[in-house]
Structures are given as structure tokens and as C-alpha cells.
Amino acid sequence: MFITILEAGSLETFLPDLGEKLTLVACLAFFLYYFMKELKQVREAQEKQRQDYDARFQTMFERVAEMERKSMEALNNVSSSNERLADAVVELKNQLKHTTR
């Protein structure tokens, strides 16, 4: 059926064109396959970099939070030390008042 539609002379010109087109399609398919493979590798590398960045950010955030907590503890210790010192001064004043009378 296919041969009857095509004339004998056009069959000779059709087959080389078909071969060129099939070769072009095969080359494009291989290119697309390797391009998609490379794209997948790039995406995986980017995802790994993002995960590494997130882990480093989380570690840094935890360190900053720990430093802030320690800083608050130090400020609280200074405040309580100041309060104890002030209480001790008041107590000494009271003792001096009682001993001088």
C-alpha cells in the first residue's frame, strides 16, 4: 500500500530523507537524555548544598541561641550579685547603727 502511493522515483528520494530525519531524531533523543541526566545531577547537587546550608544555619542559630542564653544567665548573675551586695550593705549599715547605739 505504501509503495503504491509513492512512485518508484520518489521512493528513492524518500528513503534518504527518512534516514536523515531518523538520525536527527535519534541524536536529539540522546542529547535530551544526557541533558536530563545532567540536569538531575545538578538538581541533586543543589539540594545537597541547600541541606548543607540549612544544617550549617541551624548549627549557627543554635550557637547564637546558646550564647544569648549564657549572656542572659551572666546578666542575671550580675543582677543577683548586685542585689546581694546591696542587701549586704544595708545589713552592714543596720549592724553599724545597732553597735553604735
Image (cartoon, grey):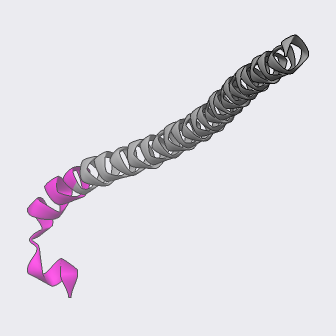
Q: Residue at x 34, y 46 (%)?
A: 28
Above or below, 41 relative to 21: above
Residue at far right of view: 99
| Viewer-proximal residue among 98 and 42 | 98
Determine which quarter of the picture holds residue 6: bottom left
Query: x and y percent of residue 25 in the render?
Result: 31, 52
Query: x and y percent of residue 19 in the render?
Result: 30, 52
Query: x and y percent of residue 48 in the render?
Result: 61, 39
Q: Is residue 24 magenta?
A: no
Position of 92 with respect to 8 (left or right) is right
| Viewer-proximal residue among 62 and 2 | 62
Position of 57 with respect to 33 (left or right) is right
Secondary structure mostly seen in magenta is: helix
Q: Residue at x 74, y 29 (%)?
A: 80
Above or below, 2 relative to 97: below
Q: Residue at x 86, y 21 (%)?
A: 98
| Viewer-proximal residue among 50 and 26 | 50
Determine which quarter of the picture holds residue 49: top right
Q: Quadrant of the N terminus?
A: bottom left
Q: Which residues are magenta?
A: 1-17
Q: Is residue 5 magenta?
A: yes
Query: x and y percent of residue 22 in the render?
Result: 32, 54
